[in-house]
Amino acid sequence: MRRPSTAVSAFGLALILTHGTATGQEVGPANGSLVVVGGAMQSEEIVNRFVQLAGGTGARIVVIPTAGGAESYGPSFGGLRPFQRAGVTDLALRHTNDRAEADSEAFVAAIREATGVWFTGGRQWRLADSYLGTRTEEELWALLARGGVIGGSSAGATIQGSYLARGDTRTNTIMMGDHEEGFGFLRNTAIDQHLLRRNRQFDLLEIIEARPDLLGIGIDENTAIVVRGDRFEVIGESYVAIYDNQSTLDSGGRFFFLSPGDQYDLAERRAYRVSRQLVPLERVESRPWSRP
């Protein structure tokens, strides 16, 4: 796990050990959960799952809207509404473009008390500029270590991977740009969003061809992966695409789709369909789809 470059405290060292490979987790977090959403966030199922993982209506949720690019955000910010509709009352906003502020006790205090943190959409490089290597990032890892949940939609999804897809400050059409580092809650991954809605299903191929060690995960709108350890479940309304340069599909394709209810083992890189028991998808085909 990458940690901030500042001196490591005993507590920080404990977190490194907790999230290191000694735990047996190869890709996902050893503790806690991730909810990674492909955009739009109109699915009550996804919101309710995040709230449930955060502790239900008694959850303490911090929303971080920094990717959106505004100077400030107030209590009327729309990114709070899904959680308000779900019955959560303990909501806090945290936003800064100042890395010194992101390193301050005043800024991270709410995250330290949170049971869930949510990143809204925009440009993912803004999250990297503000929080990578700061106490804010350290507290995000601590949240996972104590069993909390981190979620995000669109830019808030991509930042959770280790490689920052579409991280260029000039345009969001450049896949490998001037920012390439995400938080790495999912190790050795590159995450893309708005997959089918924006006709992006071929875009991640550029990254996994240049970086064949990476697993590509493309997520359509109103669709999410819920990660516990090294396995995720697909929920929502559409598809998740898997790009794995280390295996050849029986179909001859470059990627394949998972539907809501399907599961995927990130360490084994193996897909499963859930019936009465987990059934391996031995002969994965690229399922037909149509643009919404």
Image (cartoon, rainbow, N blue to C red):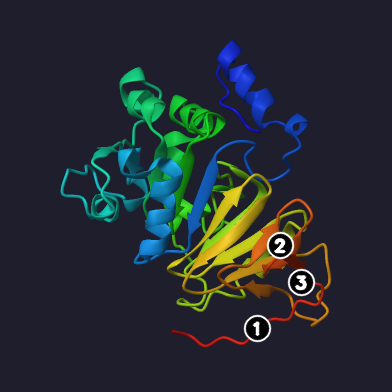
Q: Position of residue 159 (x, y in %)?
A: 51, 49
Residue at the spot 58% in from the left edge and 44% down from the top edge:
181
Q: Residue furthest top?
A: 10
Q: CA distance from mark 2 to mark 3?
A: 22 Å
Image quarter in which the N terminus is found: top right
Question: Given the image, on which type of amino acid does mark 1 rest?
Answer: Arg
Q: CA distance from mark 2 to mark 1?
A: 21 Å
Q: Which residue is mark 1?
A: 287
Q: Which residue is mark 3?
A: 281
Q: Which element is circle 1 on?
A: loop
Label 1 Cα crowd, 10 Å radius (few <14 / some 14-19 / many 20+): few
Q: Position of residue 178 (x, y in %)?
A: 54, 50
Q: Which residue is mark 2?
A: 208
Q: Which element is circle 3 on?
A: loop
Image depth: mark 2 or mark 1 in front? 1
Q: Which element is circle 2 on?
A: helix
Count numbered badges in the picture: 3
Question: Given the image, on which type of amino acid does mark 3 rest?
Answer: Leu
Q: Is residue 142 above or below residue 260?
A: above
Q: Which callout, 3 or 1, points at the residue further toward the start of the chain?
A: 3
Label 3 Cα crowd, 10 Å radius (few <14 / some 14-19 / many 20+): some
Q: Nearer the viewer, residue 281 or 287?
A: 281
Question: Given the image, on which type of amino acid does mark 2 rest?
Answer: Ile
